[in-house]
Image: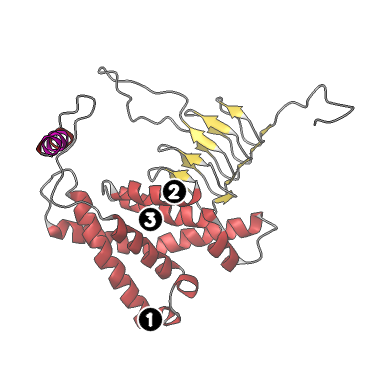
Amino acid sequence: MNTLTNTLRDISAKLNRNDVPECEFIPCPDSLPNMDSIKELVGVAKAVFFPHIFGDMKDMREDGMNKQVEHLFTLLNSQIYSSLCSDNKLVEPQTATDLTLAFIGKLPEIKRLLATDIKAMLDSDPAAINCSEVIFCYPAVLAMLHYRMAHELLMLQIPLLPRIITELAHSATGIDIHPAAKIGEYFSIDHGTGVVIGETCVIGNRVRLYQGVTLGAKGFVYDDHGLPMNVPRHPIIEDNVVIYSNSTILGRITIGHDSVIGGNIWQVFSVPPHSRIVQKKAITSFTDGGGI
């Protein structure tokens, strides 16, 4: 038994070391973001944005909304402070408080943007009955709520927390939006599963995506050490563009306004406004028996 105990202790000691040559771990600080608290603060944010659906009826009264916003402030202040400390920097608590207040001040604008997204989803989908159904049932609403919060946090230069928030939505919906992407008003995603929007994407107003669309990088620029550089590498999608299912748009190219990209397109070159990009029709097809 002593031999087994010693063997297990030896393995534990090796696992506890931070000298893995392929990856230098940052020593764990005293304070790290807490996943349960982050999930709770996103839930409170949902009740703040949509109290008639995700909150108590009393939250629709002014005193109820005050309590919800105060609760959100408390949760967020703690997680912002932990995120600021996550790389072992010394941070004054007041810094986190100031950043939290700055973010809270952006809540009305985030709500306005979410309202435009919901309106776009309602208007573009004949299967949608009303805004309440869209808010309740459409995964893109959840993904955009997470993204629009995370984007504002990232604009305040808060580390780690924005990525955690968007990855929670990614896990729940299959929609992967980097918080640094820039997305305009009235943005909609139909169905949503498998959509990927990269870090340096710039998306205009009234853009609609379908499931499986990738707005990704064609390649990378490397520094002198052979590491990829964080430079603009994802597409620019101008206003009023529709991109249908399973199309892949790669590189720092521009899809001109009022264009339509058909399904299953591989696009690596810019196209001018009012373009229509579709697959060629099949020359041959089955005429007898089974098949397509």
Q: Position of residue 35 (x, y in %)?
A: 30, 55
Question: On the rendered structure, is 64 left or right of 253?
Answer: left
Q: Position of residue 165 (x, y in %)?
A: 36, 52
**Predominant secondary structure in magenta?**
helix
Residue 62 image label: 1
Looking at the rendering, the stretch of residues picked out in magenta corresponds to 3-11
Q: Quadrant of the C terminus?
A: top right
Quarter of the N terminus within the rendering: top left
**x and y percent of residue 284 in the render?**
82, 22
The magenta stretch spans residue 127: no
Q: Which residue is mark 3?
A: 149
- In the image, residue 142 sits, relative to residue 212, either above or below, namely below
Which element carries disc 1, helix, strand or loop? helix
Circle 2 packing at 10 Å, graded few (<14), some (14-19), many (20+), is few
Label 2 sits on residue = 171
| Residue 286 higher or lower than 136, as above or below | above
The residue sitting at 58% across, 60% down in the picture is 119
Colouring mode (rainbow / by chain / secondary structure / one colour): secondary structure
